[in-house]
Amino acid sequence: MIRCRHPLGDTGDDAYRHEECGVFGVYGHDDAAAHTALGLHGLQHRGQEACGIVTYDGDHFHSHRALGTVGDNFGSQEVIARLPGAMSIGHVRYSTSGETVLRNVQPLFADFKFGGLAIAHNGNLTNAYAVRKSLVDKGCIFQSTSDTETIIHLIAKSEYSPVVDRMIDALRQVEGAYSLVALTREKLIGVRDPYGIRPLILGRMGDTYILSSESCTLNILGAEFVRDVDPGEIIVIDKKGLRSIKPFQKAPSRFCIFEYIYFARPDSLMEGKNVYEVRKQIGAELARECPVEADMVIPVPDSGVPAALGYANQSGIPFEIGIIRSHYMGRTFIEPSDQIRHLGVRLKHNANSGLIKGKRLILVDDSIVRGTTSTKIVEMMRNAGAREVHMRISSPPTDHSCFYGIDTPSQQELLAAQNNIEEMAKLIGVDSLAYISFDGLYRAVAGEDRNSEAPQFCDACFTGEYPVRLTDQEDSPGPQQLSLLAEQE
Ligand code: SF4
């Protein structure tokens, strides 16, 4: 998909960590669009800049794509009524500023000689530029700057016949992270890349099948969780039922460990683990590894809450809500300028001054990206009269960028890439700063130390060990590849 930006923290630096995207699909329900809208609403935390739904009613495809949130765009019965059909896919998206244009909003749709196909993507292709350049050289005309369109062109050019074979042929030519949902006249298709970097799950509600980035959507719909789609698996759902295909060369699973730390909703199940429980475990491990005397443990809302609870339970230090977050404004990272971002932080978080005054605090956050938000929050705690402010981070230092669908800042802009922990503590203004260790994180998430021989997760933003080749970066380093191509259009 488009270079969905994200995270690293609702906290921390959500001003700079950017959400990835979410995908959703329904097969076999008369009200597929309404269910998809509800599903996308449950995935809204994965992207708030744009959203879209495509349905098929047996004769025609119907599409509505727009900038803004799901509530803004699919909240009215009138819009849903214009999306008839029992099959549907949808997408929520975050992108870099400047790319927020309608032509990039998904699902993308194209007419092929075999009929129409809509596709929605969470992730990022690491050879999109190289493939796109070769397609442009052969005369392909791109309408968006989305790497998802690369897949559409590869499907169009494939010499295979059934649509699933065309998709397999196309996906064998791309590298990177992708969880896809696609819709044809007959089928709902879900695909997870061979490393399983981004999540995709299968759910069911009677005879209706559901594909979703996260399982939290199933509760909203009253559907049951069936299972995670396996890495490298293609799920094909049509009138004959559900078929599973594993056509790609088997690769070691490298699920994004940051889904557990920050991205996913805490009420989701990821790879069989409840995200909330994992975050609490991480907090407990953090307390064992990085103790400090204090009067209270305070989460940086909202994503720091479960880890702070785990820290408080393990340390015996009371958990308190010392920062109140306003839920009635957009996430600060949506605002483009530093000036607005800084204003946004103040509007969004407020110190619970009566509680904090004269106290020694442990602030628990999930990550630090550039440090801007952390600095503001620490300053807020000091201004509210905190005696000491200690910061504990429930991930190792983020010192590498993500190229798999989370558009973090360049390495030069990452605080941990440029400073050691003491320097960071000074810059942020805390009395002490400590991060969970790699082994501690792996113990909390997987129950065992990190084994560098066979890591079970992608942890590249902490280690620089990228599981999938970064072809575009190696061939043409720099952040603007797709944009440069766009300028040639
Ligand atoms: Fe997740 Fe890997 Fe990207 Fe880090 S580099 S955010 S672990 S996919």
Image: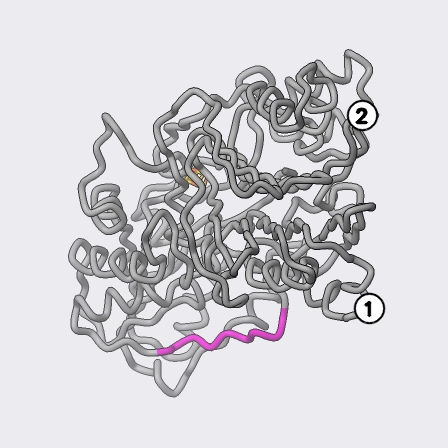
* Distance from the alpha carbon under mark 1 to that under mark 2: 32 Å
In the image, what residue type sits under mark 2? Lys
In percent of the image, x 32 and y 45: which residue is there? 396
Tell me the chief SS of the magenta region: loop
Q: Is residue 406 above or below residue 312?
A: above
Instruction: In the rendered structure, find residue 485 and report the number of the disc placed on it.
Output: none
In percent of the image, x 33 and y 71: which residue is there? 298
Q: Which residue is mark 1?
A: 78
Q: Earlier in the sequence, mark 1 or mark 2?
A: 1
In the image, what residue type sits under mark 1? Glu
Indicate the position of residue 88 as horizontal and vertical percent values: 68, 51
Quick check: can you spot residue 58?
Answer: yes
Q: What kind of element bears circle 1?
A: helix
Depth order, front residue of 432/111: 111
Asked if residue 328 lies in the magenta stretch, the reply is yes
Image check: 303 left or right of 212? left
Image check: 194 left or right of 111? left
Depth order, front residue of 108/222: 222
Q: Is residue 40 above or below residue 89?
A: below
Q: Which residue is mark 2?
A: 113
Indicate the position of residue 454 as horizontal and vertical percent values: 25, 28
Residue span colored magenta: 321-329
Indicate the position of residue 474 as horizontal and vertical percent values: 53, 17
User: Which circle, 1 or 2, is nearer the viewer?
Assistant: 2
Ligand 1's quadrant is: top left
Depth order, front residue of 431/54: 54
Image check: 450 left or right of 366? left
Asked if residue 464 lies in the magenta stretch, the reply is no
Count of numbered circles in the view: 2
Q: Quadrant of the C terminus?
A: top right
